[in-house]
Image: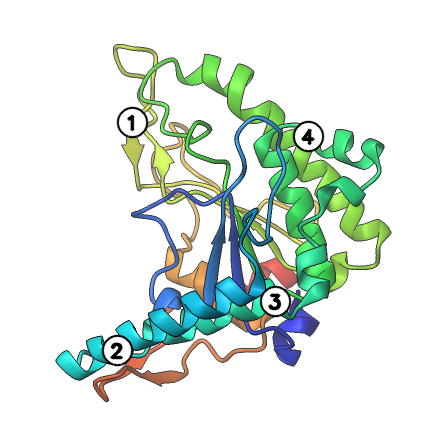
Amino acid sequence: DLAAARAYGFRAEFCEVNSYTRWDRHGNLITEIRHINVHIRKGDATFELDLLPGLTVERLNNRRGLLADLDAQRRDLAEAATAGDLSARVQNAYTLLTENARFRAAFDLASEPAEARDRYGRHPFGQSLLLARRLVEAGMPVVQANMGPMNNWDTHGQNFQQLKDRLLPPLDQGLSALFDDLAARGLFDETLVVVVGEFGRTPQINATAGRDHWSGVFSAVFAGAGVRGGQAIGASDAQAAWPATRGWYPADLGATVYCALGIDPGSQIIDRLGRPHRMNAGEVIGPLYG
């Protein structure tokens, strides 16, 4: 949510829903901002952000004190570059669990009408997108929703059958419901939605009717936040193997997101060792707004 991104009203500035990934996580963000993961509960597609049964605030305080002692000892033993990470994350999680009622309420999907939950789909991805909308309403600046460990798009075998039966239906249902919901609530124009994977699939079908990893060309969907809809930017060749027009790169996607959040993509950041880094070397994808 772009307005909330400028306000920074929450102690956590990035929330990843239904996370499981390792290689395609959040880059430098995990050390530069306060971040939490939210995992879906098996069985019913619901989320929980609450103290465990039997864990009182008093016991939580005791555990926090013990963890602070251990953290202090760890800092005394080594002057590591990440020495402050643990205490910052613990404070962030503690605040979310004990103080921020509005944020905690966003996780109560049972308060949504059954019809709304049905529109998104009673599957992990649909309920993840519903939670994402509720987090945006609560003021979370950045939310990442994953399709989950059993719904990845790594279709090395039976590509077309997997798309038809397993992957496209929840994507179509959940994403269309999210777009309609954001528009109905007046949030669409201030929320940038980006739908993308980390690479494409080979133009050639392999021996198991699958498609393997391919970086030559792949697509992304942008919507909201001033993006002009109803257009396709760029084109591939006849084999969908290489760009036939100007190509855009992952760094350009990142620059576009930074710009939408009101952040200069070319800003310089300093790491904990005092070394300067350029935040992003890409170019904003101008035709999105043309």
Query: Residue 161's mark?
Result: none
Which quadrant does the N terminus fall into? bottom right
Report whether 1 appears left or right of 86.
Answer: right
Please tell me which residue is depicted at 41% across the width and 80% down the height of the picture. Answer: 266
Residue type at the position of mark 2: Ala
**Badge 3 or badge 2: first in the primary sequence:** 2
Q: Looking at the image, is mark 3 or mark 1 nearer the viewer?
A: 3
Density class for disc 4 (Cα within 10 Å; few <14, some 14-19, many ≥20) is: some
Residue type at the position of mark 4: Gln
Q: Secondary structure beneath disc 3? A: helix
Q: Looking at the image, is mark 3 or mark 2 nearer the viewer?
A: 3
Q: Are marks 3 and 2 in contact (CB under 8 Å)?
A: no
29 vs 247: above or below: below
Q: CA distance from mark 4 to mark 1?
A: 26 Å
Q: Looking at the image, is mark 1 or mark 2 nearer the viewer?
A: 2
Report whether 78 appears left or right of 62.
Answer: left
* Residue 273 image position (x, y, % from top left): 21, 85
* Residue 209 image position (x, y, % from top left): 34, 12
Residue type at the position of mark 3: Thr
**Badge 4 or badge 3: first in the primary sequence:** 3
- Residue that label 4 marks: 173
* Residue 87 image position (x, y, % from top left): 37, 75
Density class for disc 2 (Cα within 10 Å; few <14, some 14-19, many ≥20) is: some
- Residue that label 3 marks: 98
Report whether 231 appears left or right of 242.
Answer: right
Query: Residue 212's mark?
Result: 1
Density class for disc 1 (Cα within 10 Å; few <14, some 14-19, many ≥20) is: some
Q: Are marks 2 and 4 in contact (CB under 8 Å)?
A: no
